[in-house]
Amino acid sequence: MHPQEIPCPCCKCILALLTYAFLVACSSIYLYIYLSIHLSIYRSIYLSIHPPVYLCMYVSIYIAIHPCTYVCMYVCIHLYMYLSIHMSIYLSTYLCVYLGELLSLCLRQLS
């Protein structure tokens, strides 16, 4: 049934809201699966190196619900991957920057 065939404006509004809710649910499920797959990859690489950092990342990813949060986590995880390449040179500086980003993200989610 096309929206043009629905005579009641209220019904059109309800249909639009249901469609939006369906799309949001599908995208959330997709993001959850996507993050879970990437998390398992990162876990296998980094768990033996930085278990506390991995645990914080794990908790933060599962708190991530909204797309903007997903983008923040995506950037943080890739930032961590980039930083881990150069960590042998500037270990303390990069680790502080990464942990600061991760902490600020966690605090934003909790507030």
Image (cartoon, rainbow, N blue to C red):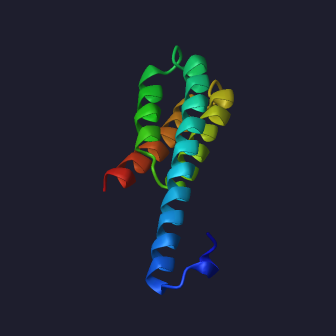
Count of numbered tags: 0
Instruction: State whether residue 94 is above or below residue 1.
Output: above
Report x, y in % for residue 91: 57, 29
Q: Is residue 37 left or right of residue 103?
A: right
Report x, y in % for residue 42: 59, 26
Report x, y in % for residue 49: 53, 17
Query: Image point 51% across, 78% down: which residue?
Result: 12
Query: Image point 44% across, 49% down: which residue?
Result: 105
Q: Is residue 99 left or right of residue 27?
A: left
Report x, y in % for residue 39: 55, 29
Query: Image point 45% across, 73% down: which residue?
Result: 14
Toward the top, the furthest residue is 48
Residue 16 appears in the rendering:
yes
Residue 68 appears in the rendering:
no
Could you say which is closer to the camera, residue 99 or residue 37?
37
Could you say which is closer to the camera, residue 45 or residue 64?
64
Task: Tell me the quadrant of the picture where the C terminus can be found.
Answer: bottom left
Toward the left, the furthest residue is 111
Task: Tell me the quadrant of the picture where the N terminus can be found.
Answer: bottom right
Query: Image point 44% across, 82% down: which residue?
Result: 10
